[in-house]
Amino acid sequence: MSAFSKTPGWLDWHPNPGKPHWQLPAGAVDAHCHVFGPGAEFPYAPERKYTPCDAGKAQLYALREHLGFARNVVVQATCHGSDNRALVDALRHSGGRARGVASVERSVSDEQLQALHDAGVRGVRFNFVKRLVDVTPRDELMEIAARIAKLGWHVVIYFEAADLPGLWDFFAALPTTVVVDHMGRPDVSQPVDGPDFGLFLELMHQHPHVWSKVSCPERLSLTGPPALNGERNAYADVLPFARRVVQAFPERVLWGSDWPHPNLRDHMPDDGLLVDYIAQIAQTPALRQQLLVDNPMRLYWPEEC
């Protein structure tokens, strides 16, 4: 058993997610998910700001089969810091059906980067959400980005909408493809045509190297969890934002479940319902093919494209 005690109030992943009501396209990729530990085998980082439940590769890959995905992109969880052993272990046990996004520090050696590449890592994540991590100086991040660009990797960035103006120039200058987590966490109480979300859309318009994940409506929605509104088409207030990004940039969008959904406070989503949500944001078979197959394959498995 793990020697770690979960953060008080921590919500564990859904024990019995439903089956999606529609069939995913062949080869669909869950392009944003995590593994936590198990802590007894892969200890959580001493500097972590939360302690999760254990949620290892066996549970992740069982969920993949249950939902009907073919592949996963496993993103390093902040609770593991820059210790990527749990991530690498998950990739090595995936049978080639998973790629990874790691977290590294300036001190990482070229040999260590190559070892991560050989294991299936294809990107690094820069986190600017202060409640989750101590933000790394930008000069260090730029140095890391220049080094991983030589491997053909990309940068995943996590930030909150209010911080975009101060981060714009840094994101624009990154020498790699840049993938924004969860549409930059827009405030969905504001109009989809308003200036705040408009700034994010303008970032994508001006900078063709910027992509976006249209994921995590459960984090952004203000209309309450599905258990309260009783609808399969929950998170309706997030739909206009996600649809706008998919329609405007169909060749630069990804979707991910975010399993096992860290740091949620009000409800734990049904992963089957989250898959049903995809059909509402990508409303044609062609858009779903790009979102779930063509785009993630081009970014993470280009050798197969």
Image: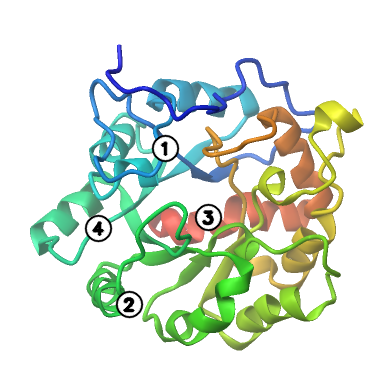
Q: Which mark is residue 97?
A: 1
**Image spot of residue 6 (x, y percent):** 42, 25
Of the pair 146 and 53, the residue shown nearer to us: 53
Q: How is the image coloured?
A: rainbow
Q: Which residue matches tag 3?
A: 296
Of the two numbered discs 1 and 4 on the same chain, state the one appearing first in sequence.
Answer: 1
Q: Secondary structure at mark 4?
A: loop
Q: Is residue 270 above or below residue 234?
A: above
Q: CA distance from mark 1 to mark 4?
A: 23 Å
Q: Which mark is residue 230?
A: none
Marks 1 and 3 close (CB-CB < 8 Å):
no
**Image spot of residue 26 (x, y percent):** 63, 39
The residue depicted at 29 percent of the width and 47 percent of the height is 81
Residue type at the position of mark 4: Val
Q: CA distance from mark 1 to mark 3?
A: 12 Å
Residue type at the position of mark 3: Pro
Q: Nearer the viewer, mark 2 or mark 4?
A: 2
**Image spot of residue 261 (x, y percent):** 56, 36
Instruction: Answer with left or right where residue 74 lies relative to residue 62.
Output: left
The residue depicted at 61 percent of the width and 65 percent of the height is 184
Of the two numbered discs 2 and 4 on the same chain, state the one appearing first in sequence.
Answer: 4
Q: Which residue matches tag 4?
A: 104
